[in-house]
Image: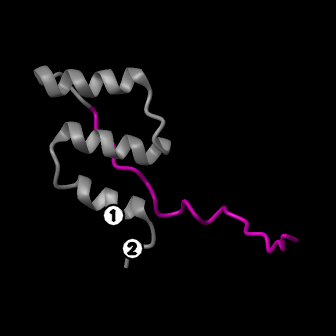
Amino acid sequence: MKTNAKEYLKEFATSQQDWLQALIYDAIETNGNITDERKNKIFKHLINGADLSVTEPNISNECNDLTFLDTKIAL
């Protein structure tokens, strides 16, 4: 069972074209902060087939370092 949206996005990306897969994977890795340089590389690949590296994101341990605090807020 998937536990977060990034797992669903990663699964969806596996069946997509290279440019869309790269865009989704980069969004996962950067929390949506894809650099203009990377967006331009993806766009060039989409337009003329320029070389594009696609690296599958590692999402398995993302939540292991989080600390949750039990806090009460007085209203």
Quarter of the image with the N terminus in it: bottom left
User: Which amino acid lies under the numbered mark 1 shown in the image of this protein?
Assistant: Tyr
Tell me: 20 left or right of 64: left
Q: Main secondary structure of the magenta part?
A: loop
Residue 52, given in percent of the width and then of the height, sits at: 24, 29
User: Which amino acid lies under the numbered mark 2 shown in the image of this protein?
Assistant: Lys
Quarter of the image with the C terminus in it: bottom right
Q: Which residue is mark 1?
A: 8
Q: Residue at x 25, y 45 (%)?
A: 21
Cα distance, mark 2 to mark 1?
Answer: 7 Å
Q: Which residue is mark 2?
A: 2
**Farthest front residue?**
75
Please tell me whether mark 1 sits on a helix, a strand or a loop.
Answer: helix
Tell me: 48 left or right of 1: left
**Farthest left residue?**
48
The reply to whether discs 2 and 1 touch (Cβ–Cβ < 8 Å) is yes
Tell me: 23 left or right of 29: left
Q: Is residue 54 magenta?
A: yes
**Numbered label tally:** 2
Residue 10, given in percent of the width and then of the height, sits at: 32, 57
Disc ID at residue 25: none
Q: Which residues are magenta?
A: 53-75
Q: Residue at x 45, y 45 (%)?
A: 29
Nearer to us in this view, 73 or 62: 73
